[in-house]
Structures are given as C-alpha cells and as structure tokens.
Amino acid sequence: MSDTGRQSLGDKAEAAVKPDSQKTYLEQGKDMLAGKSDSAASSAQPDSQKSTTQSIGDSLSGNSNENSDSLMNKAKDTLGMQK
C-alpha cells in the first residue's frame, strides 16, 4: 500500500522491469514524470508520517529525505557497474 500521493511499489517495479529500449517515448516520459513526482513527494513527507511499506520502498529506491543513493546503485557502484 502506498501513501497518498505516492507511487505504489508495484508501479515502481512495473516501470523498472521493462527496459527503456522497449518503451515508447510516451512511456519513458510518463515514467520520468512519475519518478520525479514521487521523489518530490518523498522529500516533502516527513519520515515519521510514512507507512512502513513506503519507508522500505524509499530506502530501496533511494527516495528519502536525505536524498541518499539507492541500495541498488550502491551495489552497482561497488561492483564497478556505474556509468
């Protein structure tokens, strides 16, 4: 369950599963706007008001009030897979 005004974990996963190379420009634009909107909502919402599910999702995706990098990106950086 996602908090009001936030992107659900299912929606985030759905957007992440399909590679950008297989998405239309419209899908890519929609994903970008949804991600930016969710990130802004994450930063605006105090951690104390986030549901447990939303807090976990923010930690995994890097959407947090501290604007820290996601666990996935940290792992990629450690393995030398970042750009």
Image (spheres, helix red, strand yellow):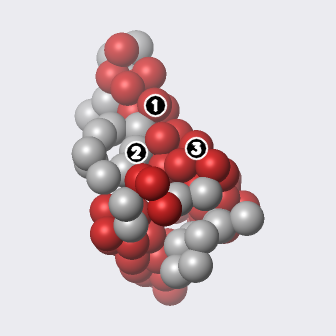
- Residue at 61% x, 57% y is 51
Residue sitting nearer the eye, 35 or 24:
35
- In the image, residue 75 sits, relative to residue 46, either above or below, namely above
Q: Which residue is mark 2?
A: 62
Q: Earlier in the sequence, mark 1 or mark 3?
A: 3
Q: Which residue is the extreme one toward the top?
A: 79
Callout 1–callout 2 Cβ contact below 8 Å: yes
Q: Residue 74 appears at what percent x and percent y?
A: 37, 26
Q: Quadrant of the C terminus?
A: top left
Q: CA distance from mark 1 to mark 3?
A: 11 Å
Q: Earlier in the sequence, mark 3 or mark 2?
A: 3
Q: Residue 19 appears at what percent x and percent y?
A: 58, 55
For residue 56, the mark is 3
Disc 3 is placed on an element classified as helix
The quarter holding residue 41 reads bottom left
Q: Earlier in the sequence, mark 1 or mark 2?
A: 2
Q: Which residue is mark 1?
A: 71
Callout 1–callout 3 Cβ contact below 8 Å: no
Disc 2 is placed on an element classified as loop
Q: Is residue 24 visible?
A: no
Q: Residue 80 appears at what percent x and percent y?
A: 33, 17
Q: Which residue is the extreme one toward the front?
A: 48
Q: Which residue is the extreme one toward the bottom?
A: 26
Q: Residues within 10 Å of mark 3 (few under 14, many from 20)?
A: some
